[in-house]
Image (cartoon, grey):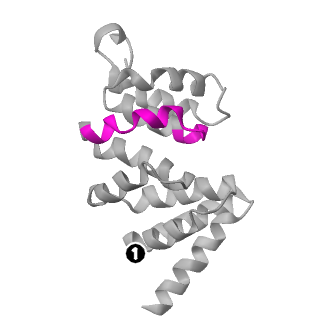
């Protein structure tokens, strides 16, 4: 309905808030709208505000699922950073080998969080190609906040080749 559309758009505008706690609450509001929020989040993806980009990606990851494979594939080459970053994260959740192959160029993306999302998706799915980026992210070269996510992704390559001890 029009009322829901307007409420959703208002919630998405709140994703720009400087206060992280308030922004997280806004993400939860947007996620509560479900898949219907996706087109409005895509419209908002033109933002250059880093905090809002994070919030858009978090919100989209909260509502996207395997039915969005075509959308994920299309966004892998988007000019809009939040959409590329979403695609990098969701490709790992979908886990199809041909989709994972398409993440390789994103390891060199100009936007570092997009590089890390692509690397996490690859490593979580048993692919070593993302390890170099994850090493830099874990070491702090890509900014704070990646350590726990990197550690959570490592079991994906555990017990493979030279990585026998990882994930134990």
Q: Is residue 109 left or right of 20 when viewed as pictured? A: left
Residue 106, percent from left and from top: 47, 37
- Residue at 34% across / 51% down in the picture? 73
Q: Is residue 66 left or right of 39 when viewed as pictured? A: left
Total numbered labels placed on residues in the image: 1
- Residue at 31% across / 26% down in the picture? 126
Quadrant in the picture for the C terminus: top left
Quadrant in the picture for the N terminus: bottom left
- Part of the protein shown in magenta: 98-114
Above-or-below relation of 60 to 29: above
Residue 93, percent from left and from top: 33, 45
Find disc 1 in the rendering and name its residue: 36
- Dominant SS of magenta comes to helix
Residue 65, percent from left and from top: 32, 57
Q: Residues within 10 Å of mark 1 (few under 14, many from 20)?
A: some
Front-lying residue, 14 or 86 = 86
Q: Is residue 22 left or right of 130 when viewed as pictured? A: right
């Amino acid at each position: 309905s029009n009322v829901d559309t307007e409420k959703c758009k208002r919630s998405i505008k709140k994703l720009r808030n400087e206060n992280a706690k308030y922004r997280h609450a806004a993400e939860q509001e947007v996620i509560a709208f479900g898949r219907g929020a996706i087109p409005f989040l895509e419209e908002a993806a033109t933002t250059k505000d880093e905090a809002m980009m994070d919030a858009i990606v978090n919100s989209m990851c909260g509502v996207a699922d395997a039915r969005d494979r075509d959308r994920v594939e299309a966004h892998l080459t988007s000019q809009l950073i939040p959409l590329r970053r979403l695609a990098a994260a969701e490709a790992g959740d979908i886990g199809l080998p041909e989709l994972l192959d398409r993440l390789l160029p994103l390891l060199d993306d100009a936007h570092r969080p997009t590089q890390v999302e692509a690397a996490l998706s690859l490593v979580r799915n048993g692919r070593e190609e993302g390890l170099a980026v994850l090493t830099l992210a874990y070491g702090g070269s890509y900014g704070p906040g990646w350590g726990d996510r990197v550690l959570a992704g490592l079991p994906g390559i555990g017990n493979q080749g030279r990585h026998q001890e990882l994930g134990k």
